Amino acid sequence: VTRSVSLTRKAAVKVSYSNSDDNADGESKSLAATPSFIETPLLLLLYPSLVSHKKEFGNPNIPLGSPDGKRCATVRRLHFQGKLSAEEVDHLQEMGFRFNSFEDVYYENDFEEMFGTLMHYYSKTKTFQIPKKYEPDPELGAWVTMLRRLYNSNELPQNELARLDEVGFEWVSTRKCGSSFMKGYRDALAYLSKVAEQGGEVRELLREEHDIKKWVDAQRLAWEKGNLSESRIQYMDDLPGIDWRNPMNWA
């Protein structure tokens, strides 16, 4: 049963009653106001459960071990693929819904499924050099980026490494990210790696007013303010010879 009611938000909402056999207790899901700008079919189905979970637990992030939890995972994939509207994304974020990071794309997706997508890409392009932000399939670009990152940190499962080696996967990306962060990161990584390889004391060198020190400090300040993404934090953690989070090391 659906009826229109007024809403202080920019659009009217629908009040939806949803009875589902998916509920563990067999009871009907609670009444939930669904904004009219939500049009994605899966999100329309899931929305009452998100509202109910947020009311009970303080957030709409339903655990994976239930049908609605699996639907949440699918909504995250739809977002990463750019298939949710801006209004839907904004509203979910306001509710506290957690969207996928690059790391989530690797850990939440099935390896065989993504491997098949990778080989389909290769059959068309004859290369594994997939852009990190690959617009036709953002998940694939993120997944490949994480493969290389886990390989470089020796964290990639051996069976996955073997499968990728068999097809000649290119473990080094020849693409260059044009962001100011990545430009600064490449400079910092090259500098710190060279100093460490030559037996120099990286921490001592960075005590002075050095361009690399200034860049590291800027990233630390962004992290302290909560403005550094999880993927960039991971990059910073990979810098050799320094504890970039601890300002006492740069005194």
Image (spheres, helix red, strand yellow):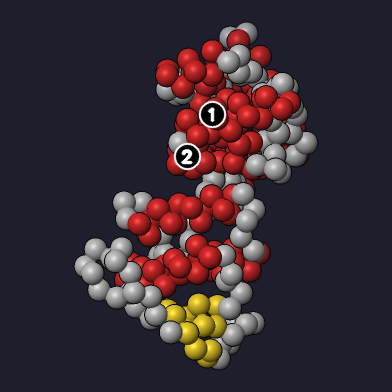
Q: Residues within 10 Å of mark 1 (few under 14, many from 20)?
A: some
Residue 101: which quarter of the image?
Answer: top right
Q: Nearer the viewer, residue 54 or 70?
A: 70
Residue 88: which quarter of the image?
Answer: bottom right
Q: Nearer the viewer, residue 201 or 139?
A: 139
Q: Which residue is mark 2?
A: 109
41 vs 156: above or below = below
Residue 157: which quarter of the image?
Answer: top left
Q: Amino acid at mark 1?
A: Phe
Q: Amino acid at mark 2?
A: Asn
x%, y% of residue 187? 72, 26
Question: Which secondary structure lies at badge 2?
Answer: loop
Count of labels in the image: 2
Please report the residue visible at 66 percent of the width from the left and 14 percent of the height from the top: 194
Residue that extends furthest to the bottom in the rendered view of this protein: 6
Q: Nearer the viewer, residue 241 or 124?
A: 124
x%, y% of residue 222? 62, 48
Kindly identify which numbered label has been placed on residue 219.
none
Please report the residue visible at 52 percent of the width from the left and 90 percent of the height from the top: 5
Q: Quadrant of the N terminus?
A: bottom left
Q: Is residue 60 left or right of residue 204?
A: left
Q: Which residue is mark 1?
A: 115
Please report the residue visible at 54 percent of the width from the left and 19 percent of the height from the top: 164
Question: Which secondary structure lies at badge 1?
Answer: helix
x%, y% of residue 236? 58, 33
x%, y% of residue 163? 49, 18
Please report the residue visible at 74 percent of the width from the left and 33 percent of the height from the top: 177
Q: Quadrant of the C terminus?
A: top right
